[in-house]
Image (cartoon, helix red, strand yellow):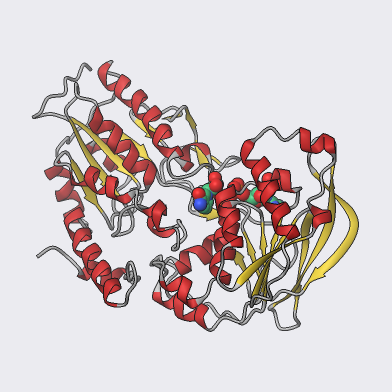
Amino acid sequence: MTQTYTPDRPLRVAVIGSGPSGIFATEALLKQTDLPVEVDVYDRLPTPYGLVRYGVAPDHLTIKSVTRGFEKTLSDPRVRFLGNVEFGRDLTHDDTVAHYDAVMYTVGASSDRRLGIPGEDLEGSMSATEFVAWYNGHPDAATRDMVLHASGVAVVGVGNVALDVSRILVKTTQELHESDIAAHALSALEGSHVRDVWILGRRGPAQAAFTTKELREFGELSDAEPVVHSEEIALSPEAEAAITDNTKKKNVEVLREFAAHQSEGKLRRVHLRFLVSPVEILDDGHGHVGGLKVERNRLDEHGNAVGTGEYEVLPVQMVLRSVGYRGVALPGVPFDEKRGVIANTDGRVDGRAGEYTAGWIKRGPSGVVGTNRKDATDTVAHLLADARESRLPGAAHPTRTAVDALLASRGVRVYSFADWQVLDAHEVAAGKAQGRPRAKVVHREVMLGHRKA
Ligand code: NAP
């Protein structure tokens, strides 16, 4: 059917997930001028911005300033934010197809990958994802009772998330105070016994996934210092010549500076270890982490880690696995289980006209916030081409009022952008009173109580 989109019958798009990819997709939809559009951005949480609010480290406030642009997008009259609406429960796949011409899934990757070693379920062993959600005040993790008795912590993986959790574990109260870390985490960390954190890379320094700016931060902490063993970062001239990536080259330089660094006797140490793989999390006899057994590795000719049969035990009481996020399937949407992404070709959902995806749930958990702008814009270009060439199936009930009536009939307490602005202003004011950038509200019911009159 040929559909002409007009100001009275605009192209209606539902964006599922209000993290960076969802907002960048919305931005791209607003930027074109030939098609009148109406975009409804949904989130299962009352608050918008996804990983910018709940994933980005609380002390990386500059990265969070991207929300100023996001606010502009969500304030556009062509856009509505519908928070506290869960896709698959409050709004099903069939509902979106009935009310929108196109649906864009941008839900990110909310789960984590496991190590698959004995002891992974012991008390004190968890994913970095859980730990991040806890210190960032995610409503699903805020009530978790995180006891920080450990003096030694192992963080498995050498990506930026591993660096984030390690840095938060070793920062002083004063340093943390300057961040927007959740109050419960600030007080738990204030009483923390952590002295040593081991960040473990299974391959060598030239293969580490982290970025140099984040690595450098370990040399700039008030009362913690980096420890690097020069023999673990030694590279043959051939291996050194083979590093073509500039970030990786700079990483190696910074690690060399760390290895040459004389201890200043700071309270806490961050040990950056390479060529070691965890093989077993040891039980302390009470079902709690009592140590981490690691095997030394060497690199084979393809750059893969191979065990040497030499072992050591790290004296840790907490293990955070930080080996990547994993996407979770959405009800009614084709999923590629192997890759942990929505089954798609260049952002078009396989076998589904009018359904699209962008961000981590499209391509997997890689890249920084800004990477998702191009990714989302690329998918939107396909959506717009399909709209212009009448390839969209067309909605049966293409109005805001129809979808509002449906959600109201189900008793869904939709949280609007105006409601969020009330909560946002409250958090900023409460933070200011404590000399902090923001004091996050962490309980969903309390959030829902802050509404536009
Ligand atoms: P990541 O960058 O993919 O790093 C995952 C790490 O886990 C890699 O070092 C990987 O090593 C290791 N790993 C995987 N399986 C392992 C195993 N079985 N045993 C030991 N190590 C294992 O993932 P991430 O840290 O979760 O970050 C996700 C994305 O968010 C990245 O693009 C990251 O840059 C971005 N991010 C950016 C910032 C920032 O800009 N400040 C902050 C946080 C996150 P191998 O290479 O050997 O597989």
Question: Going 24% across and 51% down the picture, which residue do you hit?
Answer: 82
Q: Tell which of 222 and 391 is nearer to you.
A: 222
- Total numbered labels placed on residues in the image: 0
Residue 415 vs residue 126: left or right? left
Q: Is residue 63 left or right of residue 15?
A: right
Residue 150 in the image, given as x and y percentages of width and height: 64, 79
Up-down: is 276 above or below 11? below
Q: Quadrant of the C terminus?
A: bottom left
Q: Quadrant of residue 370?
A: top left
> Residue at position x 59%, y 74% from top?
223
- Residue 47 vs 78, above or below: the answer is below
Q: Position of residue 8 (x, y in %)?
A: 8, 29
Residue 357 sits above or below residue 298 on the image: above
Residue 325 visible (yes or no): no
Q: Quadrant of the N terminus?
A: top left
Q: Determine the image quadrant of residue 281.
A: bottom right
Task: Establish if 130 lies above or below 392.
Answer: below
Q: Nearer the viewer, residue 113 or 89?
A: 113
Left or right side of 436 for 160: right
User: Residue 330: x percent and y percent?
Assistant: 43, 46
Residue, far right: 309
Report the residue at 42% width, 37% height from top: 358
Q: Is residue 148 visible?
A: yes
Q: Position of residue 328 (x, y in %)?
A: 49, 49
